[in-house]
Amino acid sequence: MPHDDLRGFLDALDGQGQLLRITDEVLPEPDVAAAANAVPRLGDAAPALYFDNIRGFTNARIAMNVHGSWANHALALGLPKKTGTKEQVEEFIRRWERFPVEPEWRENPLWAENTLEGDDVDIFQVLPLIRLNDGDGGFYIDKAAVVSKDPDDPEHSGKQNVGIYRIEVKGRRKLALQPVPVHDIALHLRTAEERGEDLPVAIALGNDPVISIVASTPMLYEENEYELAGALRGAPAPIARAPLTGLPVPWGSEVVIEGVVEGRRREIEGPFGEFTGHYSGGRSMPVIRVDRISHRTDPVFEHLFLGMPWTECDYLIAANTCVPLYQQLKADFPEVQAVNAMYTHGLVVIVSTKKRYGGFAKAVGMRVLTTPHGLGYASTVIVVDEDVDPFNLPQVMWALSTKMNPSGDLITVPNLPVMQLAPQAQSPGLVDKLIMDATTPVPPDDRGHYGNQVRDLPEAAEWLDRLQRLADRG
């Protein structure tokens, strides 16, 4: 059965041995973040962390690393916790075929137990805020689903957006938001400002595990995240109407913050230790005025540690970055076999493909750079043959070592867009991009000597299964 709220999923993780409850008293800083920094190093079955004894706080409860391993990610999708990385991506693709699944409106949302409005709003009363990295410029909310609508077409459910964006707490009812230009909320805000309006938003914290996955999936502008959640869950996603803005928010959230992004108002936001593994610096960013907070009693604050990969963030945005790129490439090039865009939200993308003719792989690489996500993220694209598993890095390195000839297989495209957080950009938001063709040349490309490649023995696959069964018994 799919999970309708965060607490239900935490209980499920506990039952599978994937939740570690820290009962000793800990310091809010640095202990909570340091533990979340460390726990992914336990491997692909690292547990989530739950803190409820934090010095200086009363009744504070913080959950970290909820999606921070392939085991937890599998359980979020209702799969056995030992499901492998490639298998999870393949299952994600299969479930995408069900899309769209209409959400289900429900009454009496869990977050409606308590309310603060107007001048009574004080986010510090509701959330046990902590800094994650020692260079952060303040307290951040970094795993909330931010809901907004296209001001020009608010009734179009596909043009609504549910996305995860970093949010700095600037005061008891003031937040700063970083909308990357390629993201949907940036388009919504631009439209609102062109109309001379503020942009209403609802910020949902502590969500069921699939909501966090879809909110960080780079979907097309007119694709509805709740409809993808239904496809991934195998059941409609439960939603409710936020009382102040009327925006659709997850039914089972711990906290719902409502307000507006104030048109044409900017303040310095940052620095923040980002998913690139670097601090992003301070920039002038939009400001949110908070007008209402609704929350469960003693809400669980779900936080997300970011730093040098791999952290929870990398598990959260791994499979769901691969699949949209695969779907978009496959529509134009049926020869594409698989896409691995797990690394730093797709700043590096590895594609395996068959070829129609010489130069075909380079054309596939160019298409990656022009997908909606590739425009703002993909800076290096590696293209390999169909018999090379892009999720198997030794195989990819073998392809680069033996198939790629720098004299003709490195294509640099200058001055293309990239997100401003990309630290390699000489000018923020602009970078030269690279395509590496590590495929076997096919006619009329006759370079190299590839007539005698060693292939797996026909019996190797059967023996792999046999050996795995023997190892499992031992």
Image (cartoon, rainbow, N blue to C red):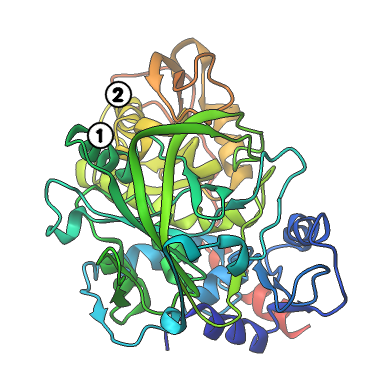
- Residue 387 shows in the view: no
Secondary structure of the residue carrying tag 2 is: loop
Mark 2: give few (<14), some (14-19) or many (20+) Cα within 10 Å.
few
Disc sitting over residue 443 in the figure:
2
Q: Which residue is mark 1?
A: 356
Q: Quadrant of residue 399?
A: top right
Foreground mark, 2 or 1, reads 1
- Residue 216 shows in the view: yes
Nearer to us in this view, 325 or 438: 325
Residue at 63% over, 34% down: 271
Taking the view exactly as shown, the residue that stands out farthest to the front is 119
Among numbered discs 2 and 1, the one appearing first in the sequence: 1
Left or right, residue 341 beside residue 158: right
Q: CA distance from mark 2 to mark 1?
A: 9 Å
Nearer to us in this view, 468 or 411: 411
Residue 298 in the image: x percent, y percent? 61, 80
Nearer to us in this view, 295 or 394: 295
Residue at 22% over, 73% down: 101
Nearer to us in this view, 38 or 394: 38
Mark 1: give few (<14), some (14-19) or many (20+) Cα within 10 Å.
few
Q: How many marks?
A: 2
Residue 218 in the image: x percent, y percent? 36, 49
Residue at 24% over, 71% down: 98
Residue 159 in the image: x percent, y percent? 19, 53
> Where's the N terminus, which quadrant?
bottom left
Left or right, residue 28 beside residue 146: right
